[in-house]
């Protein structure tokens, strides 16, 4: 399986680490809402289909990525930086001068 | 009285560094392995939004103009620089003292300077079969159109993190952790045996 890192380009999946479900919303640290904390820690959608995920390119540029992976086919329909302010340095198109 | 320790930097490759021709070299030596031993290896990181200022500081201090784009780099005149992650750059100089020059140019508002001169070992592989040998190590495209001269790549070989810069059409400089360098060097020598290699 190849994952296209927005910085490094297509790389083998062994260079990446799964960092969890990308749909979770962390409550404020001082939140007393136990239902919200319970949902954050335990509730997962577990869909058969497109799934929002957080990955890290731990064996490459080490940035965190937000991507949509199909849990049935493993097709990855989009990847981007988890932090959205580095789009300006995304890799030029394939074969272009790096 | 104990002798004073020499300040000379010792190579971690020293016990396994055997200059000369090795492997299957009777039909020619197809790769040359060397340790480049630069005086300075730095890692520079820009805060988000300060990338352009950091690139300007690199040009001011080293005279090297970074090309646009991810993984872009340039090498020459005893110095080299390449991007290895968003907003992060490795800068190398044959001479020592690059960290103090950058600590003035890279202000706290721009980013950080980390001196890795003693933490990384620089290994150069050159020759017509350099791409072939490296392709056995790393699952990345080493062809010239995909990996242009000067460009840098971050990848791993069995959890040994490696930064690779192409410094010539058939020449690559590999930066590995110093503590893994001897193991990596031995693996590189084994992988080069089939094509014939010379250690210089």
Image: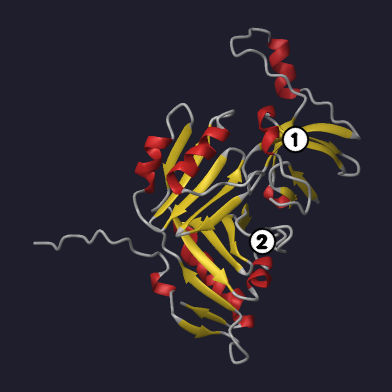
User: Are marks 2 and 1 in one subunit?
Assistant: no
Q: Chain of mark 1?
A: A
- Find the residue positioned furthest to the bottom: B26
- Find the residue positioned furthest to the left: B1
Judge the density around disc 2: few (<14), some (14-19), many (≥20) Cα neighbours within 10 Å.
some
The one nearer the camera, B118 or B146, is: B146
Indicate left or right for B58 with B136 as reference.
Answer: left
Q: Does the image show residue A96? A: yes
Q: Which SS class for mark 1?
A: strand
Instruction: Say which residue appears at 64% left-offset and 76% top-offset.
Output: B128
Specify how the rendered protein is coloured.
Answer: secondary structure
Quadrant assignment, res A44: top right
Quadrant assignment, res B132: bottom right
Q: Does the image show residue B187? A: no
Q: Position of residue B29 (x, y in %)?
A: 58, 84
* Residue for badge 2: B138
Instruction: Say which residue appears at 88% left-offset and 31% top-offset.
Output: A47
Q: Position of residue B116 (x, y in %)?
A: 42, 49
Depth-wise, is mark 2 or mark 1 nearer the camera?
A: 1
Q: Chain of mark 2?
A: B
Q: Position of residue A11 (x, y in %)?
A: 73, 51
* Residue for badge 1: A80
Q: Position of residue B105 (x, y in %)?
A: 41, 36
Instruction: Say which residue appears at 57% left-offset and 85% top-offset.
Output: B23
Position of A22 relative to B178 (above/below): above
The one nearer the camera, A27 or B63, is: B63
Instruction: Say which residue appears at 44% left-offset and 79% top-offset.
Output: B18
Position of A59 relative to B23 (above/below): above
- Find the residue positioned furthest to the top: A32
Q: Which SS class for mark 2?
A: loop
């Amino acid at each position: 399986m190849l994952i296209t890192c927005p910085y490094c380009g297509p790389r083998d999946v062994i260079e990446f680490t799964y960092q969890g479900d990308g749909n979770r919303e962390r409550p404020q640290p001082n939140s007393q809402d136990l239902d919200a904390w319970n949902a954050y820690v335990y509730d997962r959608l577990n869909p058969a289909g497109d799934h929002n995920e957080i990955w890290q390119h731990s064996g490459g540029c080490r940035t965190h990525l937000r991507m949509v992976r199909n849990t049935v086919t493993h097709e990855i329909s989009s990847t981007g930086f988890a932090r959205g302010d580095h789009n300006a340095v995304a890799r030029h198109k394939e074969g272009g001068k790096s | 009285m104990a002798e004073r320790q020499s300040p000379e930097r010792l190579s971690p490759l020293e016990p396994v560094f055997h200059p000369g021709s090795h492997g299957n070299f009777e039909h020619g030596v197809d790769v040359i392995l060397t340790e480049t031993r630069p005086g300075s290896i730095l890692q520079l990181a820009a805060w988000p939004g300060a990338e352009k200022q950091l690139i300007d500081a690199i040009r001011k201090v080293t005279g090297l103009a970074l090309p646009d784009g991810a993984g872009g780099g340039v090498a020459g005149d005893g110095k080299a620089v390449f991007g290895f992650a968003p907003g992060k750059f490795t800068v190398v100089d044959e001479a020592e003292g690059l960290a103090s020059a950058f600590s003035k140019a890279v202000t706290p508002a721009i980013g950080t300077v980390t001196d890795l001169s003693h933490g990384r070992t620089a290994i150069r592989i050159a020759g017509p079969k350099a791409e072939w040998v490296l392709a056995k190590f790393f699952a990345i495209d080493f062809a010239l159109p995909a990996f242009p001269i000067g460009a840098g790549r971050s990848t791993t070989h069995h959890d040994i993190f490696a930064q690779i810069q192409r410094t010539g059409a058939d020449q690559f400089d590999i930066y590995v952790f110093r503590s893994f360098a001897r193991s990596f060097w031995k693996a590189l020598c084994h992988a080069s045996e089939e094509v014939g290699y010379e250690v210089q």
